[in-house]
Structure formats: structure tokens, C-alpha cells
């Protein structure tokens, strides 16, 4: 039995990078939603910063969902 260490290292590196990127993206989405709630609670009213925070948060969550769906596609296919 031979183990291809280069392939194993490559899979580990890609998995680590994708995991860190996904967690970072999800964190940015959470931060965007908290900024939106903070701006709304302060009484500043609906403004460009609230809409931008909401749009950015939804974009981050959509990218997370797309990455998870692509991972499931790779596993199933």
C-alpha cells in the first residue's frame, strides 16, 4: 500500500483554505447583519449604510450557500 503524500497534502491544503474562507465569509455576513440592526436601533432610519450592510450580508450568505452546494455536488457527482 502506497500513500500519495503530495495528493494528501494538496487535499489538506485546499480543505483548510476553503474552510477558513467559508468561516470568514459567514462571519462577514453576521457582522453585516449586526451593523444593520445597530443602525436601525440608533434611529438613523433607512439609509444607504443600512441597505449596503444588508445587501453585503445577504451576498456573503449566498456565497456560503453556493460553496456548500458546490461541495455537495462534488461529493455526489
Image: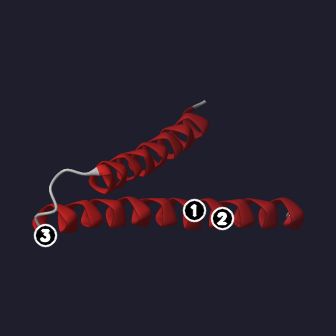
Residue at position x 71%, y 66% in the image: 12
Give the secondary structure at mark 1.
helix
Alpha carbon distance from label 3 to label 1: 31 Å
Q: Position of residue 47 (x, y in %)?
A: 25, 51
Q: Earlier in the sequence, mark 2 or mark 3?
A: 2
Viewed as shown, does residue 4 lie left or right of 63?
Answer: right
Front position among marks 2 and 3: 3
Q: Earlier in the sequence, mark 3 or mark 1?
A: 1
Q: Circle 1: is it few (<14), some (14-19), or many (20+) Cα within 10 Å?
A: few
Residue 57 visible? The answer is yes
Residue picked out by circle 1: 21
Corner quadrant of residue 59: top left
Residue at position x 64%, y 67% in the image: 16
Q: Nearer the viewer, residue 21 or 14?
A: 21
Residue 77 to residue 10: above or below: above
Alpha carbon distance from label 2 to label 1: 6 Å
Q: Position of residue 72 (x, y in %)?
A: 51, 40
Q: In the drawing, what numbered circle is on residue 17?
A: 2
Q: CB atoms at circles 2 and 1 under 8 Å apart?
A: yes
Residue picked out by circle 3: 42
Q: Nearer the viewer, residue 68 or 55?
A: 55
Q: Circle 3: is it few (<14), some (14-19), or many (20+) Cα within 10 Å?
A: few
Residue at position x 61%, y 38% in the image: 74
Way the structure is coloured: secondary structure
Q: CB atoms at circles 3 and 1 under 8 Å apart?
A: no
Give the secondary structure at mark 3.
loop
Corner quadrant of residue 14: bottom right
Residue at position x 48%, y 45% in the image: 63
Q: Quadrant of the C terminus?
A: top right
Alpha carbon distance from label 2 to label 3: 37 Å
Amino acid at each position: 500500500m502506497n500513500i500519495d503524500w503530495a495528493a494528501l497534502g494538496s487535499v489538506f491544503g485546499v480543505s483548510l483554505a476553503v474552510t477558513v474562507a467559508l468561516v470568514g465569509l459567514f462571519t462577514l455576513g453576521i457582522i453585516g447583519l449586526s451593523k444593520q440592526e445597530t443602525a436601525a436601533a440608533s434611529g438613523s432610519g433607512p439609509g444607504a449604510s443600512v441597505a449596503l450592510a444588508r445587501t453585503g450580508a445577504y451576498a456573503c450568505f449566498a456565497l456560503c450557500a453556493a460553496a456548500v452546494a458546490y461541495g455537495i455536488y462534488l461529493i455526489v457527482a
